Amino acid sequence: MSQESKKWKLHIGCHKKTLVSRDSDVREHGSLEDCRCDVQESEEFWKGMGYFVWFAYVICPDGKKVQLHEGTPYS
């Protein structure tokens, strides 16, 4: 298994209650716990700017998808 395939890929997005205020990113981490910490830190940071978590899930090294945040609706 290559080093690239051992990465945990966190897919995360935020919004400010509108469709045009959305943004998203894919971040690589070494463990599921690192991904969970990133989601928590991102949520706290975004709240300070009036944004909310849009979605957050991880693609594990074995290809399994793990939901980390249910997301916040626009309304």
Image (spheres, helix red, strand yellow):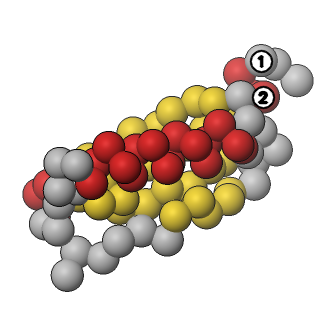
Instruction: Tell me if 50 is positioned left or right of 38 in this view.
Output: left
Residue at the spot 42% in from the left edge and 68% down from the top edge = 71
Question: According to the image, label 1 marks what residue?
Answer: 3
Relative depth, front residue between 38 and 29: 38
Residue at the spot 58% in from the left edge and 43% down from the top edge = 37
Question: According to the image, label 2 marks what residue?
Answer: 6
Within 10 Å of the Cα at label 2, are there few (<14), some (14-19), or many (20+) other Cα atoms?
A: some
Residue at the spot 35% in from the left edge and 62% down from the top edge = 54
Residue 6: x %, y % from top left: 78, 28
Marks 2 and 1, how far apart at CA: 5 Å
Q: Which image quarter: residue 64?
A: bottom right
Quadrant placement of the C terminus: bottom left
Q: What kind of element bears circle 1? A: loop
Residue 45: x %, y % from top left: 32, 43
Residue 24 at least partly seen = no
Residue 60: x %, y % from top left: 73, 45
- Most extreme residue toward the top is 3
Instruction: Tell me if 69 is positioned left or right of 21 in this view.
Output: right
Residue 32: x %, y % from top left: 72, 44
Q: Which image quarter: residue 18?
A: bottom left
Tag 1: amino acid: Gln
Within 10 Å of the Cα at label 1, are there few (<14), some (14-19), or many (20+) other Cα atoms?
A: few
Tag 2: amino acid: Lys
Q: What kind of element bears circle 2? A: helix
* Residues at discs 2 and 1 in contact (Cβ within 8 Å): yes
Residue 28 at least partly seen = yes
